[in-house]
Image (spheres, rainbow, N blue to C red):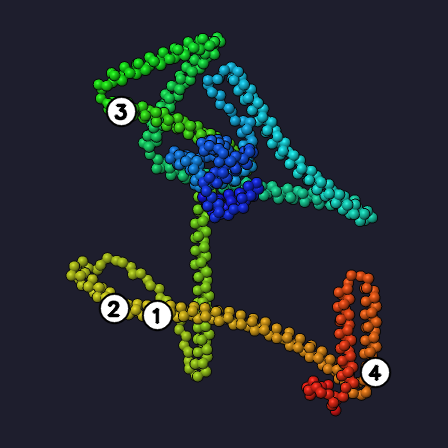
């Protein structure tokens, strides 16, 4: 189990109605009995039954109840026999490996499983033992089957009605929205009608608008038809490509087709079909015999208890006779070789396995035919929905995706190479420009010094391939000498070419080193440029911040100058002898504030704001004390003060 699956189980157990409030670690540490209890509670919740405490229930009953519920809910256990046995043992013992997949299946399909459990209460057939099977039970089973069919029809109608009711709500909501839009349109129409009622040539304008609207509708219709035709052409091209690819695959298969393999497959299939036909014939004969026997039994008259006793005695007699015959057979076979009995048992086992395999093969073929039929039906439906076009299969889509992925990788690779070539082209172009500029500067400098610059244009000579012809002589010695001369010339040319190759390799290495150095320098330049840009941006931000601080400091300085001027004016008034007037103003202001404080206190005496009034009185008294101290300082002679020189009131001289 993955961590996401376990997290889903834990989250579901933490919700209503379980509310376990557990975590992944705590859930992993659950004991086997608690895991079984959790599984039992979840199954009871899904099947809408009362919860059962497994401690009050026998283990075999718990296992039987859990397996029956899982069978009703169509949980698929492991298909392998060994794995199935291990899973069953784990379910009984409370193993995590067996219970976790069941819990994940239950919580992943809760609503569907609840509906299935609800339907199982009314649609599961009750098996009647053959001992008590009679005409009444047969009639009762037929009535039950009839009621089940009626229940199915009624349930389908209920589901359909529920869907229709939801559809009706949607239709009502659409109708309400359409009514609102209709009212809005009516208002807009009335508004437009009031605007154009007095407009001249109204009929001609309306007819022109109608003609314009018809042309627009016709234009939209033509656009839709053009798009449909374009889509049809694209679909036809795709269909042609698919058919061509299928035709190519069929032709390749036809080229590599081996008739012997097909004949061998057909022979094997014929043998299998022949064996199945014989098996079906035997089963048909057996079924016919059972039908004849049942018809004979059903046509018999009513049997009383005495006849039943007689039949039991006959059955006992036949069983005793069979026992005697088996003992006689065993006595006769005592003298035979025991290996024959082993072979007979092996042959019987092989025959039984062969019949089981044939039955399984027949079931598999029936399932395969059913799947082919459903696949054809789904293809027809999808073809109808897609306008009669073929549906792309999953294999074709996978092949298309793989091909597209390969083309994408190739495209990215080619694009990278193209980018490298472009960058190299830019570098070489810039190099040519620099070399041309240096050449021009050197040329101008040399011409300025009185030198003559001769420009030579090297025209590449065209190498003409020598025409071959027959040798002029047939003498072997002359031909041998000619070959020796040619070999000597070839060796001389090779000796001349070798230092040129070495020089070329050296120049290429120097060029590569130069290009690599230039790339490194370019990278350093880009890195230094980015660093300088970032430093410049940071310095620019600092400058802007300092300018803002400078402006704020200038504003504060101006305000301080204004305050200094006001203080100097007050000081001049004090020194000029207007102390009495200032003192009188301060006393008047103090009395005024005192009267206001008393008035506020009287008004707030009957209210519950005593603490606020006390705070306000303290503030006014503190203010009064400050003013009194200021008056005392104003009346005091600065020269006779006992305060330190730095704390005395400054005077003007």
Residue shown at 63% from the left, 42% from the top: 222
Q: Is residue 549 above or below residue 633?
A: above
593 vs 506, left or right, is right
Q: Which sits earlier in the primary sequence, circle 2 or circle 3? A: 3
In terms of depth relative to the viewer, which is nearer, 15 or 490?
Answer: 15
Q: Which residue is disc 1 drawn over?
A: 507
159 vs 530, left or right, is right
Residue shown at 42% from the left, 9% from the top: 310
Q: Which sits earlier in the primary sequence, circle 4 or circle 2? A: 2
Q: Which sits earlier in the primary sequence, circle 3 or circle 1? A: 3
Task: State the count of labels.
Answer: 4
In terms of depth relative to the viewer, which is nearer, 174 or 228?
Answer: 174
Judged from the image, the secondary structure of the residue bearing numbered disc 3 is: helix
Q: CA distance from mark 2 to mark 3?
A: 92 Å
Q: Which residue is disc 3 drawn over?
A: 342
Q: Is residue 317 above or below residue 392?
A: above
The reply to whether callout 3 and callout 1 are in contact (CB within 8 Å) is no
Q: CA distance from mark 1 to mark 2?
A: 19 Å
Judged from the image, the secondary structure of the residue bearing numbered disc 4 is: helix
Q: Which residue is disc 4 drawn over?
A: 581
In terms of depth relative to the viewer, which is nearer, 337 or 616?
Answer: 616
Q: CA distance from mark 3 to mark 4?
A: 142 Å
Residue shown at 23% from the left, 19% from the top: 334
The reply to whether callout 3 and callout 4 are in contact (CB within 8 Å) is no
Of labels 1 and 4, the one closer to you: 4
Q: Is residue 347 above or below residue 247?
A: above
Q: Which mark is residue 495?
A: 2
């Amino acid at each position: 189990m993955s961590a996401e699956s376990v997290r889903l189980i834990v989250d579901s157990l933490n919700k209503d109605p379980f509310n376990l409030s557990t975590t992944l670690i705590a859930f992993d540490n659950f004991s086997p009995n608690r895991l079984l209890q959790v599984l039992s509670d979840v199954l009871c919740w899904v099947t809408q039954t009362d919860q059962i405490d497994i401690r009050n229930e026998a283990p075999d009953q718990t296992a039987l109840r859990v397996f029956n519920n899982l069978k009703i809910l169509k949980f698929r256990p492991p298909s392998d026999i060994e794995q199935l046995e291990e899973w069953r043992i784990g379910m009984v013992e409370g193993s995590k490996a067996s219970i976790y997949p069941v819990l994940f299946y239950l919580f992943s399909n809760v609503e569907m499983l609840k509906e299935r459990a609800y339907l199982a209460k009314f649609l599961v057939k009750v098996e009647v033992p053959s001992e008590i099977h009679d005409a009444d039970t047969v009639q009762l089973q037929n009535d039950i089957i009839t009621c089940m069919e009626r229940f199915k029809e009624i349930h389908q109608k209920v589901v359909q009605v529920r869907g229709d009711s939801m559809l009706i709500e949607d239709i009502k909501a659409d109708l309400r929205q359409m009514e609102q839009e209709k009212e809005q349109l009516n208002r807009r129409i009335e508004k437009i009608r009031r605007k154009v009622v007095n407009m001249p040539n109204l009929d001609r304008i309306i007819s022109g608008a109608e003609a314009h609207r018809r042309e627009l509708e016709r234009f939209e219709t033509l656009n839709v038809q053009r798009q449909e035709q374009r889509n049809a052409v694209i679909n036809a091209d795709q269909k042609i490509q698919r058919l061509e690819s299928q035709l190519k695959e069929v032709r390749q298969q036809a080229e590599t087709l081996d008739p012997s393999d097909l004949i061998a497959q057909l022979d094997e299939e014929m043998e299998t079909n022949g064996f199945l036909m014989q098996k079906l014939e035997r089963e048909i004969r057996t079924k016919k015999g059972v039908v004849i026997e049942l018809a004979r039994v059903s046509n018999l008259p009513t049997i009383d208890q005495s006849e039943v006793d007689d039949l039991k005695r006959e059955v006992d007699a036949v069983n005793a006779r069979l026992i005697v015959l088996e003992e006689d057979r065993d006595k006769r076979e005592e003298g035979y070789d025991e290996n024959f009995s082993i072979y007979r048992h092996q042959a019987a086992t092989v025959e039984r396995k062969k019949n089981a395999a044939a039955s399984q093969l027949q079931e598999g073929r029936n399932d395969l035919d059913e799947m082919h039929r459903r696949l054809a039906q789904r293809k027809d439906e999808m073809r109808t929905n897609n306008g009669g076009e073929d549906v792309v299969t999953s294999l074709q889509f996978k092949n298309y995706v793989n091909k597209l992925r390969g083309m994408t990788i190739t495209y990215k690779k080619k694009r990278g190479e193209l980018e490298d070539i472009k960058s190299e082209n830019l570098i070489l172009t810039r190099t040519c420009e620099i070399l041309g500029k240096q050449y021009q500067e050197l040329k101008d400098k040399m011409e300025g010094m009185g030198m003559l610059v001769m420009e030579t244009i090297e025209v590449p000579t065209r190498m003409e391939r020598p025409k071959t012809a027959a040798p002029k002589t047939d003498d072997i010695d002359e031909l041998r000498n000619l070959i020796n001369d040619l070999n000597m010339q070839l060796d001389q040319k090779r000796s001349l070419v070798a230092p040129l190759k070495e020089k070329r390799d050296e120049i290429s290495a120097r060029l590569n080193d130069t290009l690599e150095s230039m790339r490194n320098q370019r990278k350093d330049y880009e890195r230094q440029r980015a660093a300088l840009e970032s430093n410049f941006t940071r310095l620019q931000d600092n400058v802007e911040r300092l300018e803002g601080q400078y402006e704020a400091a200038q504003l504060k300085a101006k305000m301080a100058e204004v305050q200094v001027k006001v203080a100097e004016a007050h000081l001049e008034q004090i020194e000029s002898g207007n102390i009495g007037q200032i003192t009188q103003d301060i006393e008047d202001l103090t009395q005024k504030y005192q009267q206001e404080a008393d008035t506020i206190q009287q008004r707030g005496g009957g209210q519950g704001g005593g603490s606020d009034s006390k705070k306000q009185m303290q503030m006014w008294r503190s203010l009064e004390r400050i003013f009194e101290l200021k008056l005392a300082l104003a009346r005091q002679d600065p020269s006779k003060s006992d305060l330190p020189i730095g704390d005395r009131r400054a005077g003007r001289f």
